[in-house]
Image (cartoon, rainbow, N blue to C red):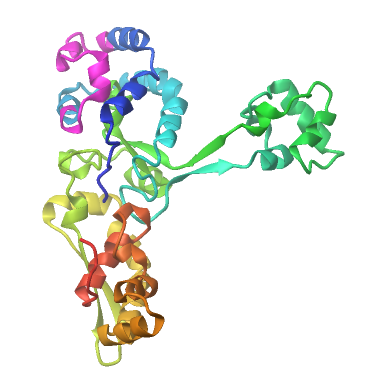
Amino acid sequence: MIEISYPKNKKEFEKEYLALFDIQKIEKAWEDELKSIDKNSKQIFDSSIKKLLLLPFNKLLEIYKKFPKNEKSEDIKKSIYTEYQPEIAKFFMKYSKEINLKTCYFCNIDFINTVNFDVLDILKEGTKQELKELDGIGDIYAEAIIDYRENNVINTIQDITNIKGINNVSKIEESIVVKNHFTLDHFLPKAECPILALSLYNFVPSCYSCNSKFKKEIKLLESYLSPTSKDFSVGKDIKFKAYYKDKVKKSNLTLEMKYPKNIQSYILTFKLKGRYEFHKNEAFELIEKQEKYSETRIDEIANILKISPHQVKKDIFGKELFEGDIQDKSFTKMKRDVAKNIGIKGVKE
């Protein structure tokens, strides 16, 4: 439910993305295989391959709707996307800060991020593949390190110089190993329209649940339903409200999600009502705190501690209510809506 914010220097961002690909190779492969599907397929888009890779989402959607659906499309998907998938993932990992990759853009429930691995930890416990990702270690040294670990303990990086052939560890020490904790969803299914399988603005970094368990190959064919679209509206359209059905006994807490009918398919696809209902205690905690800490009480605490009432609110209710972006922390959208609803002042729009 979060629109993706792309880097301010978008030209450089896109230029670097194009550099991942052998454009001529892709163009030849697509031309040959598109002809096998429909000899008129090329007429569906009048852009060069470079432009196709960078078209905005609304243009991608137009192409998708015109593209002839054919079972042979699956073959194109396998031959093109699979080859470049690792590099595309690395590209998004590199730009994780610029696009604020922290929580799933579809749900704002699960975290998505990149993780830097410690070189020494990899030397101590890493798999052969993980060892090979370190600079200066190939197949031979990876196996040698694994053999060495069977009878020896690696306490420092320098310890591996005991292995024959490994003399200089400076490259290994400077290695940066980054793993991703996210999936890349093709918002417009690549199996049905493989020419969009590599288009930058068809990728939505998302959690495993949203991508693989819920959305899968489901088609959401309106521009305002894709976080990559400038028309994306889901985050603004959903409104949360929490209240007790029995106000006297303060029991039966209900979390209500209101939304316009036009985004119902999005809500149903990602099972948002049930998933948020499961986590309604996040809203319950806000209600409990709000009952304990009135504005007057907060002012009193601020005077005692010699800090601002605003700082007291951040410490009590959580700073995500008052600053930062929605995707910085899980459930921020829900918490802000509930906080406004129960009368906590100063909550960020």
> Picture quarter containing residue 212?
top left
Nearer to us in this view, 346 or 287: 346
Q: Where residue 317 sits in the image (x, y, percent)? A: 35, 73
Seen at 21% across and 77% down, the residue is 343
The reply to whether the magenta stretch includes residue 77 is: no
**Above or below 36: residue 323:** below
Farthest residue in the left direction?
261
Question: At x 69% / y 25%, what residue is drawn?
Answer: 137
Which picture quadrant has residue 27? top left
In this view of the protein, can residue 51 be seen by the observer?
Answer: yes
Q: Residue furthest bottom?
A: 248
| Image location of residue 260, percent across then percent down | 12, 57
Q: Residue 248 occupies which quadrant of the picture? A: bottom left
Majority SS type along the magenta span: helix
In this rendering, is residue 130 above or below 117? above
- Which residue does the image show at 68% across and 22% down from the upper left? 138
Q: Position of residue 128 (x, y in %)?
A: 68, 31
Q: As drawn, is 153 to the left or to the right of 298?
A: right
- Is 177 or 58 nearer to us in this picture? 177
Quarter occupied by the C terminus: bottom left
Q: Is residue 222 visible?
A: no
Q: Is residue 52 magenta?
A: yes
Task: Give the residue at x 30% y 51%.
Answer: 270
Q: How many marks?
A: 0
Magenta range: 34-59
Q: Is residue 46 left or right of residue 134?
A: left
Residue 143 percent coordinates (x, y): 75, 27
Vertical side of 214 occupied by 160: above or below:
above
In the image, is residue 229 above or below residue 62?
A: below
